[in-house]
Structures are given as C-alpha cells and as structure tokens.
Amino acid sequence: MDGIVSTGFCGALDPSLGIGDIVVSGDGVASPRPFVQGQILSLDRVAVTAAEKRNLHEVTGAVAVEMESDAVALKARELGVPFRCIKVVSDTAAEDMPLDFNRYRDSSGRFSRPRIAFAAVFRPFTAIPGLLRLDRNCRHAADKLGEFFADCQL
C-alpha cells in the first residue's frame, strides 16, 4: 500500500476560499489544477456559524474544517503509510449553515435525513432555501473534486 487519502467535503475557515476550491493537507500531491495547501482541521461536529468558523481559523490557523480525516490519519499511522487529505469546499467561511446539523445526529453520530427534513419544514423560508443552496454547492464541489482527481498525481 502506497498511502491513504481522505477525501470529501470541507467547510472553509479561510475567508479567501470559495465553493469548489480544493484544499490539500499532506505532501506528494501534484496537479495542473489550482489547489490550496494548508492545515485541515478535523472536528467531531459541524462548524455551524460564520462566527465559529472565524474563531477556529484564528485559534488554529487551519484553512478548512471537516469531520473524518483524523480517524483516517490514525489508520494510516497504524499501517505506517503516508497520509494525505484532499477536500473540496462546500460552504464558505462567511456562511452559516441553514440548520445546526449537530442537533440531528443519532447515537452513532450519523446525520438523520428525516430529522433534518422535519426541522426544515418548521423553517420553510430560511432552512429550505439554505438546504437547497447547500445542495447546489455540494454538487458543484463534487464536480470540482472529480476534475481534480482526474488530473492529479499522488
């Protein structure tokens, strides 16, 4: 095994990052496509508000935040292989999430889509447009991540 890559979505902490920007943590990634090299903070919860993201950026210096890579990095260390984290921005540092997704997790930490949908029904003029915007952002970001992997070398 040559190494392990953690990939997926992240939230921007650096205000200069936009939807679809690629963020790489770890060495040995080359691509003709632009990307930002920087620290990606892994939390066990969603960073919900712009104020929280700003604070995380100031305190840690990280450029992005996500929820999975610490566990993947641990496995790479256990196996003694290189680890890289390649994420794509799905929400900017200036954006609040449409809902506090942390409130809609089950005991295993998984997000409950039915509970999220039910919560959105009670905030139809704010949560629903916000969730639709996040969905569009994620679709755009997923396309950009696919393009990046099509052209990158690890």
Image (cartoon, rainbow, N blue to C red):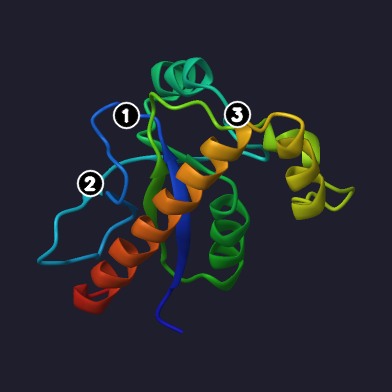
Check residue 36 in the rendering and tell me which mark sits there, or answer none.
2
Q: Nearer the viewer, mark 1 or mark 3?
A: 3
Check residue 125 in the rendering and tell me which mark sits there, or answer none.
3
Q: Earlier in the sequence, mark 1 or mark 3?
A: 1
Q: Where is residue 58 shown, x and y percent of the image?
A: 40, 16
Res 60 quadrant in image: top left
Q: CA distance from mark 3 to mark 2?
A: 35 Å
Q: Where is residue 110 shown, x and y percent of the image?
A: 77, 53
Q: Which residue is mark 1?
A: 14
Residue 85 seen by the camera: no
Q: Where is residue 59 shown, x and y percent of the image?
A: 45, 17
Q: Residue at x 77, y 31 (%)?
A: 122
Q: CA distance from mark 1 to mark 2?
A: 10 Å
Q: Amino acid at mark 1?
A: Asp
Res 151 quadrant in image: bottom left
Q: Number of numbered discs present?
A: 3
- Of 148 and 129, nearer the camera is 129
Q: Amino acid at mark 3?
A: Phe
Residue 137 seen by the camera: yes
Q: Residue at x 34, y 57 (%)?
A: 140
Is 19 displayed left or right of 80 in the figure? Answer: left
